[in-house]
Amino acid sequence: MKAEDVVFAPVRRLGELIRDRRLSPVALAETFLDRLERLGGRYNAVVTVTRARALEQARRAEREIAAGHYRGPLHGIPYGAKDLLATSGGIPTTWGAAPFKDRVFDFDATAIRKLEEAGAVLCAKLAMVELAGGMGYRQPNAAFTGPGVNPWRRDAWSGGSSSGSGSAVAAGLVPFAIGSETWGSILSPAGNCGVAGLRPTYGRVSRHGAMALCWTLDKLGPLALTADDCGLVLEAVAGRDPADPTTVDRPFRHEPADPAGRRFRFGVLRGVTDGCEDAVRESFERSLGVLRQIGTVEEVALPELPYDDITRTILFAEAASAFDDLIESGAIRGLTAPEDRYTAYARDAILAKDYLKALRLRGVMAREVDRVLAPLHALVAPGRAAEAAPLDGQVRSAIRGTARDVMGAVGNGAGLPAVAVPNGFGPRGLPTSLQFMGRAWEEHTVLAAACAYQSLTDWHERHPDTS
Amino acid sequence: MSEPEAVRAEVETMLALVRERYGSRLSAEELAGVRTAIEGIVQAAHALRAVRLTNADEPGQPFAAYRAIP
């Protein structure tokens, strides 16, 4: 089989072809490296193509598989990593920020190391919003690599903040990517680019070697063409890591197929589509019709609490501390988006007492949402309230308070897993998305639900024209 | 003092603090952007303060006593 024929094949399929020695890992790596080098710039998706490391890993995979040592479904599979994960070997790790564009670490982040152990092939460090968006950006042009360009429409945004992770998967530049989410940074690019994105439970994946934006909110997770692929990747990167004390020793195993006829119980938060664009609401209503084929859908409610304010206060306070040196020294002047150069100074207005109140309220929030989720398999909601923003427009953001996002505030504030998958298109030809959010450590449940949804729909089989 | 007045007063106090610390590096336009950001922060703080908690409601605890191994 020719490697160029499988550019939009799911990871699971690629893995089977490699395992059966019908597809060469080296040829596959060459194909995606060529696409990264040829098309990466079109979408501002790539910071560094890691050709030498990729070919070394691909050749090793080919040798091992030929010798009968098959590591599993990621063996020989190319991927890209958001450029906030440390990589050794002289590969820069820029955090998307001009002040760090030449910075090099001498070690690999745990997620990178675990993927190497699984046999995956690192082909690129992918573009991102500078400092993962923690400085208050309001526009797509907020990275030294330029605004993330959407493969479905090149005057639209792909982000953020894992912009390159979303666009690279959507454009067939890599079969999967690693992104990070503090609030929305996996689900948003997945939704904007029409791919699947999985935000794991806080503590599921080690953040050792990842840029810290907010110690109590940051999560790493995969973006891929299908929810099933996200499960394969999560299985490889999940697990306890002594270098990240927030990780736990809970096994995660992705089951590829659910028993036929499994029924789900879905909840929809009252008012969850308030503020959504009409096309997003229409896609969501259509999705609920699909979900009723595999389960029940009921309206549920959370008690009145200032959910957005809780998570936003935690995010702002921790980000101000995480980047204290950059802010105090004035080095934020070197960032790309003008508003990123001064907005963080406002965070001196957060009192320690208010930050602690937010942390205490987070506990209440976590208990309340768990109470609502306990009888359900998942809460479902639109992945994003709107089609992707135009490149020359403003980004609506719950983080800055210019949009509401209760699912994001609660899900990230309480550290809950969620997966977003494509569920339609809006009037500008850009994808809309559907998210499934579950109880803590229930990735297998939200993935099963998302896989069941994708077995009944074909949105994930549509790809942008990259010719 | 009404709630909106309390918010406005707190915004001005916090803006004065930021101006004192960083004013020399901020243009008038940037300071206006900082004011907008502070308004959001103070409004969020007032929303948090309006919720009553009990003494038993503690933050999630990532802290653990440390002892090197072995």
Image (cartoon, helix red, strand yellow):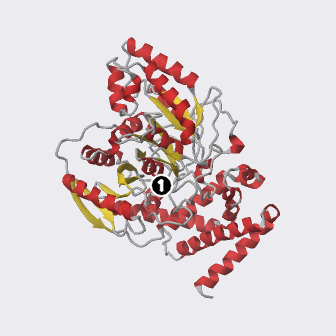
As drawn, the residue found furthest toward the right would be: B24
Q: Secondary structure at mark 1?
A: loop
Image vertical order of residue A52 relative to residue A350, above or below:
above
Which quadrant of the figure contains the N terminus of chain A?
Answer: top left
For residue A390, above or below residue A83: below
Residue A81 x/y as whole percent: 52, 36
Q: Quadrant of residue A125?
A: top right
User: A438 or A50, which lies in front?
Assistant: A50
Residue A163 x/y as whole percent: 53, 46
Q: Nearer the viewer, residue A6 or A71?
A: A6
- Image vertical order of residue A354 relative to residue A220, above or below: below
Question: Which residue corresponds to mark 1?
Answer: A388
**Chain letter of the residue beneath label 1 in the structure image:** A
The one nearer the camera, B19 or B46, is: B19
Q: Residue at x 50, y 66 (%)?
A: A403
Left or right side of B61 for A228: left
Q: Residue lying at the far left in this picture: please name it.
A: A261
Which quadrant: the C terminus of chain A? top left
Residue at 37% x, 32% y is A11
- Residue A251 in view: no
Task: Provide residue A388's location: percent of width, then percent of height.
Answer: 48, 55
| Position of residue A449 in the picture relative to residue A2 (left or right) | left
Q: Residue furthest front?
A: A467
